[in-house]
Amino acid sequence: MSTERQTSHHQSLHRRSLLRAAVVVPAAGAVAAGPDAAPAEASEDDAGAAGGRFDAESPRFALAVLPDTQYLFDADSADPAPLRATFRYLAAERSAANIAFMTHLGDVTEHGTEDEIGLAADTFRVLHGRVPYSVLAGNHDIKSSTDDQRGDSAYLAAFGPDRYRSMPTFGGASPDGYNSYHVLRAGGRRWLVLALDWRVSDRGLAWAQGVLDAHPTLPAVLTTHDIAWSDDDGEARLSGNGQRLWDRLIKGNDQIFLALGGHYWPPGRAVLTNDSDNDVHIHITNYQDRYYGGAGMIRTYGFDLVRNVIDVETFSPWFLDRDPGKRSPLAAETIELTGPADRFSLSVDFDTRFAGFAPVTPAKPRPARAVMPRGTLAYWRFDASGTDAAGTPGATVADGTVVKDLTGNGNDLTVRRLHSSGADALTWSADHHHGQPAHASLRFDGGKNPDRGAILTTAARAALNSEKFLRGYTIETFIRLPEPFEGDHSWMGILSWEGRNAEAGKTTGWSPLEPTCSLNLSPERFLQFVVYPHQQDADPTSWSHAVPVGRWMHIAVVNDGRRTVMYVDGSKIARNPAQPSTGIATLGKPFVLGATQFDEAFGQGFHGWMGDTRIVGRPLSVDDFLTPVD
């Protein structure tokens, strides 16, 4: 705790949400005096003992942060009930709310006496063995203001290395015992948490550097008691101790992307730039000035590796558990803090931010034979394996170019331009979805006013033209829409079969002149898959949400012989038709990539990139798609 800055920031709302996912953590090794001992990954039994079974590969998990609890452990007025409620919440919600780890930021107690420390240590038993955690010493936890070379203390006896020995995350402690580190597995990778004393000595800094050197590829969260202060503006500034940590440890180690401290209030945050020209987020988290000494309030950092964000929330489980009708006014206004320093989201492109020390190895192209399961009727790709004419990125794809059907079923595609379109209507590209088998695509530049574009069509006698798909089907492709998505491209076609549905005897659709099957884009950027089944006189239609621009997506349409379901990036969409749908009423006319006919005439062509496209004559599960779901 600091008495220098005692301003309050009261804004609250009864709301709480944590992303649903979970992690499992590495198994503990022996207590180490140095950084060399790296924990192994936990077994399922270890995970169960720690509070539940967790999915270490889930892209969403949370780090819980607990700041100064000293007013709850003051010998004259101690009340550990709020903290017990917080610990019960963390233990109960660990599996459902994806809580990987909890870190305390120091000033556990008010005076650091044996009685206060003993009561706090007993309270932590609620959490022990259920959620792994770290604790570090604040200035109120020790009786001297010296650094981590101070020797024995009541704090060290209770919260020293022996306390963490059984934790699967524990990696080791400094020889003095006041600094420790943990390695946890979450989001499919390992992460490092450094818990540093409130005054780290030169020896402590050397030890911390050794830990980072021994784990050079792990993103690191640094926790300490005193790193920054803030005024009511919420803008954090480095304290004197924080500046020393920045100069001696943080700015030169690109691994450290988040540094958390308490000690001062009000809360605040800042973004600093390290020696690698990358962002480091510096946050103050402290609520002891709030009602009931902060009431065991916690902050959760919800990591979402899909959305590339960290969602931060601050709330008091103790107050949340109470009957709303029996909460006091102060309890009601302190349930959750929603000001800009307490509830916010950080945009972090994790792969890019960590590339300097843990670069992502791009997936290698997969050979065609590896992605042609039983029943594959056609598979096209736009690299050298898919066409003898594949050119350099940006080069024109000439009319007459043939893209081979790699199944050997003879459904080759031939390029031709629509109307009087120029050379730039279709070009080669190296751009591709990260999970796409081939690392290449085609860039279509279709549009209206005047109509223009390019298409790839099967030959007049290709088997695919007449395939009825009575046992179901899976149609997949990869597309990316340009950003910005300029011009009028409403109802542009992505793929289709030629012909009029009236020729197949269909009478109930939107128009007898539209083709029997097509995938299109609405003016609102909704994907539309409309099919006239072989057996039914109907046009069951799937609609997606508004799809993004500037980002690759994988689209799959799956029919099991009865109904059709569309997936975007492996996620089932909501607006799939309930009508029965068996087969496709193909008419023996060509299959087309790049446009949709109306009344057997092409207007505009597709505008964007298109990658690997595959058609299988049976329904596939999500796990069997061209790219696994993230």
Image (cartoon, helix red, strand yellow):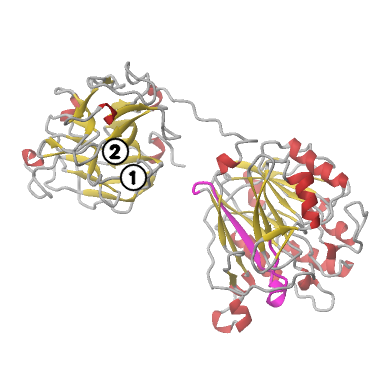
Tell me if residue 268 comes above or below residue 32 in the rendering: below
Tell me which numbered mark, 2 or 1, is placed earlier along the sequence: 1
Note whether residue 375 is visible. Answer: no
Q: Mark 1, residues whose alpha carbon is within 10 Å: few (<14), some, or many (≥20)? A: some
The amino acid pointed to by label 2 is His
> Which residue has dot 1 on it?
485
Using the image, tell me which numbered label, if any, was put on residue 353: none
Q: Which residues are magenta?
A: 284-307
User: Which one is in front, 4 or 35?
Assistant: 4
The amino acid pointed to by label 1 is Phe
Q: Position of residue 484 (x, y in %)?
A: 37, 45
Q: Position of residue 74 (x, y in %)?
A: 82, 74
- Which quadrant of the structure image shows residue 102? bottom right
Using the image, tell me which numbered label, if any, was put on residue 607: 2
- Which quadrant of the structure image shows residue 254? top right
Q: Are marks 2 and 1 in contact (CB under 8 Å)?
A: yes
Q: Position of residue 109 (x, y in %)?
A: 81, 67
Q: Is residue 306 magenta?
A: yes
Instruction: Give the SS element for disc 2.
Output: strand
Q: Is residue 175 magenta?
A: no
